[in-house]
Structure formats: C-alpha cells, structure tokens
Amino acid sequence: RQWITDCSKSHTSCSSAGILPLWIIKITSSPNGISARLVSGQSQTAHYAPLSYRWGLVDGYVMSSANKHRLQERKPLQDLPRTFADAIEVAHSLGYSFLWIDAICITQDSKAEVLQQIGIMHQIFRGSNVTLFAGAGEDAGRGF
C-alpha cells in the first residue's frame, strides 16, 4: 500500500484515475466484513485493480444475461471462489474500491460484449496502476 501511495505521489500517470470498464466489482466493508457486488462502470473514472488468473473451473461465477442481477447484489466473500475472494481482500487492503475480474465483469453469453471487451482488454489492464496476479492456482477455486 505504501509503494502505491509513493508511486501516486511521484508519477502523474499513477495518480490519475482510469476510466472504469463497462462492468466492475465494487468492494465495500462494514462491521460484518468485506463484501462485493457488480456495478456499471460506464462513464466513471476511479482507481481499480484488474485480476490476472487461470480460469480453470469457475462454475456459477461467470456473468450471464440470466444471473447479472444476482451478481449486482452484495455478496459476502465466503460465497465467491477463493481466488476471487482473495483478490477482493488484497484489493481492499491496498485501498482499492473497485476490482475487475473478466469472468464476472463480461457478460459471457453475449457474443458482442465478449468480442468488444476482449478487444479492449489491453486498455482495461493499462488503465489501472496495479494488476493483481494469482500465479499459483490451477483454477479460480484455489486462491492466491
């Protein structure tokens, strides 16, 4: 967290907020713990962290037209695959309120959205000043 603070103070490119992707995960905390929900990022700017990980099995944790409304409801971390929950905890501990995870932030059954979002994925990663990388897990259920 200190490194990110120092970087933001020293580099103008690190201090500017990026344009949020179409969909983004909003991280909130309360006395009951950290939770997350899917929100629209359209036309907003903020600091966010994308997650790079190995998909593997993400059963039930991909956004589709049918479950988009359920993902917009607040989810406690224990309801999420371990890698996603770990990423939310790390992003929160680094001071981020937004996290981008491709499985949840792209409507996977919309061919048009998938193609459009894959086409700008380099911008999604470049628009952040930190990327979380889960290199050890074989799938989204393994954790960091």
Image (cartoon, grey):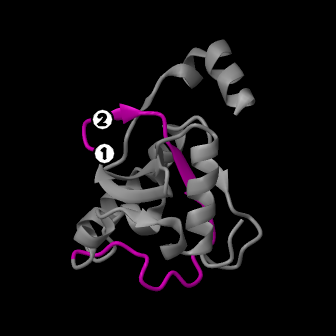
Residue 44 tag number: 2
Residue type highlighted by circle 1 = Gly
- Looking at the figure, which quarter contains the C terminus? bottom right
Q: Which residues are magenta?
A: 42-65
Query: Which of 92 and 126 lies nearest the eye of the viewer?
Result: 92
Residue 72 tag number: none
- Check the image and name the residue furthest to the front: 31
126 to 136, vertically: above or below? above
Q: Judge from the rendering whether residue 58 lies leftward or rightward of residue 111; answer left or right.
A: right
- Check the image and name the residue furthest to the right: 136
Q: Secondary structure at mark 2?
A: loop
Q: Residue 119: within the magenta? A: no
Give the residue at x 48% y 22%: 16
54 to 98, vertically: above or below? below
Q: Residue 52: within the magenta? A: yes
Residue type highlighted by circle 2 = Gln
Q: Secondary structure at mark 1?
A: loop
Give the residue at x 45% y 28%: 17
Label 1 packing within 10 angstroms: few (<14), some (14-19), many (20+): some
Label 2 packing within 10 angstroms: few (<14), some (14-19), many (20+): few
- Residue 94 pos. (x, y %): 63, 40
**Dominant secondary structure (helix, strand or loop) of the stretch shown in magenta:** loop
94 to 31, vertically: above or below? above
Q: How far apart are the two marked residues, 1 and 2, measured between alpha carbons?
A: 6 Å
User: What residue is shown with label 1?
Assistant: 41
- Residue 63 pos. (x, y %): 34, 72
Query: Which of 123 and 21 lies nearest the eye of the viewer?
Result: 21
Q: Is residue 131 visible?
A: no
Give the residue at x 64% y 14%: 9
Q: Judge from the rendering whether residue 85 lies leftward or rightward of residue 137; answer left or right.
A: left
- Residue 132 pos. (x, y %): 64, 51
